[in-house]
Amino acid sequence: MSGSIRLFLRTTENDYQLQLKEEALREGRRAGFTVEVESAQDDAGRQVAQITASIEKAHAGNLVAVLVAPIRDDVLAPTARAAAEAGVEWVMLNREAGFIEELRRQFAGRAIFSVSPEQAEIGRIHGQQVRKLMPNGGCVLCVTGPLTASSAQQRLDGLKSVIAEPYRLVTLNADWTSEGARLALERWLKNMTKDTETPSVFVAQNDEMALGLRQAARDAAVRLNLPLDKAPIVGCDGSPTLGQRLVREGRLRGTVVTPPASGPALEWIARMRSHGEIPPAVVVQPVRSFPALSSLRH
């Protein structure tokens, strides 16, 4: 099998994004594809321009498919259509989008699909981790990614489905980065009043943001004399090199392991080109708590 695959990453300064790259390169070698990687460094406009430029040169570059880890889901519909019109397969990684079903109907026979962890289940696992770590209730502060991202909203919905009274949920929005989460918590702390309930546990929708929360909580313990540095923190992504390591080192109490989506994406592209097998609209990957829920204690 031959042809070029382009992987468009959100950034190269994120452990999970680097997992996507490594898995794509590994599976590409196995399947006989040439995999090229570009990073938009968290600039949505730049990502669209990168994808557009590749599609415009698709024939000359023998471009088979584009795999996109989106910065913003809502700006990619025209780009996905352009790929389909150029005969290029389209895969969204870790996100779902309504335009995919529409394009699948209009371009039958093309591989236009998403590969994503079970996003709502991530939130449900976060809720179960919270209940294990804080069985008597209290204030849960959750820092999400941008809620324009389907993954952030679905994870939050899953969390809300599990925690109710006697838990009280506070949500802050950030940008998937450690610094963004740190600043979000610092802004919230500045607006605290004497009636504001102090968080007893922190939830971050990725491990990078969990680190930012940890730093802000430690700073608040010193500056504001708040015991936030004692509050457990759980994250998500759970790679062996970051999330699982942070749990083992005691810096996080838990994370959710989400396998990289780029490997299954390339497997489906190879199956389609070899056997004509069309992938489903969404290829769902299972997720799990690390450590196992049974081992979490207050």
Image (cartoon, helix red, strand yellow):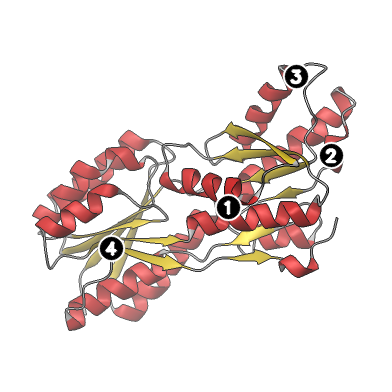
Residue 123 — which label?
Answer: 1
On screen, residue 96 versus residue 99, left or right, reads right
Asked whether the beta carbons under mark 4 and mark 2 sit within 8 Å of each other, the answer is no
Asked whether the beta carbons under mark 1 and mark 4 sit within 8 Å of each other, the answer is no
Residue 192 — which label?
Answer: 3
Q: Quadrant of residue 37?
A: bottom left
On screen, residue 141 versus residue 271, left or right, reads right
x, y percent for residue 206: 59, 49
Mark-to-mark CA distance, 4 and 2: 43 Å
Classed neighbour count for the residue bearing mark 4: other residues with Cα under 10 Å, few (<14), some (14–19), many (≥20): some
Mark-to-mark CA distance, 1 and 2: 23 Å
Asked whether the beta carbons under mark 3 and mark 1 sit within 8 Å of each other, the answer is no
x, y percent for residue 228: 83, 36
Q: Which residue is mark 4?
A: 281
Residue 229 — which label?
Answer: 2
Q: Secondary structure at mark 2?
A: helix
